[in-house]
Amino acid sequence: MKTHTAYHTFNTKKRQEIIDITDLVEECRAQAGISEGMVLVSAMHISASVFVNDHESGLWQDVLKWLEERIAPWDPDAYKHNTGTGEDNAAAHLRSLTIGHEVIVPVTKGELDFGPWQRVFYGEWDGQRAKRVLIKAMGE
């Protein structure tokens, strides 16, 4: 089995951002030299996410609005985590739980095996500081 592991650090300009990292996933696959297998992509922080969806700015705005209005509003006084730790990012933790922190992308015939429009994204919910993503390709 061939493997390759890559770490990428993101330091976003905004507290919340969605970043297309599909090219980084493909780069890791290519460096592993696999034609059949998988690539694991995992956020290494509990206030970030990795997910697969459509690369469309309107959808990204919808996701951010959905997280803010329906899942975990950014209201530091509303969360026990914030009062117990002195932080204000409980909403980011809940957003990460909702979206998820990792995905596995299949590799078939030397290519990331996506459906139409699918891309891999890093979702930052408590940014403006360095955070890492692990990308690990495995296969033959």
Image (spheres, rainbow, N blue to C red):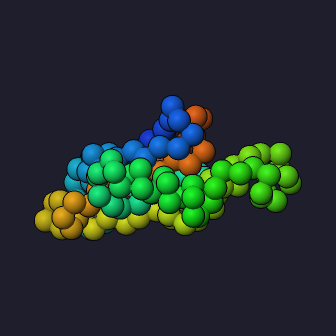
Residue at 70% over, 55% down: 90
Pick the front one: 1 or 22: 22
Residue at the extreme top: 13
Above or below, comparing residue 11 to residue 90 in the picture:
above
Q: Quadrant of residue 24?
A: top left
Query: Where does the N terminus fall, quadrant-wise?
Result: bottom left
Residue 84: % across, % down: 86, 54
Left of 121 or right of it: where is 29?
Answer: left
Above or below, comparing residue 116 to residue 82 in the picture:
below
Residue 52: % across, % down: 35, 61
Q: Does residue 81 show up?
A: yes
Residue at 33% over, 61% down: 53
In this figure, what is the number of numbered marks?
A: 0
Left of 50 or right of it: where is 74?
Answer: right
Pick the front one: 41 or 17: 17
Above or below, comparing residue 86 to residue 112 in the picture:
above
Q: Does residue 42 show up?
A: no
Residue at 57% over, 55% down: 68
Residue 3: % across, % down: 34, 57
Residue at 51% over, 31% down: 13
Residue at the extreme right: 84
Query: Where does the C terminus fall, quadrant-wise?
Result: bottom left
Above or below, comparing residue 84 to residue 105 in the picture:
above
Residue at the extreme front: 69
Residue 22: % across, % down: 30, 50
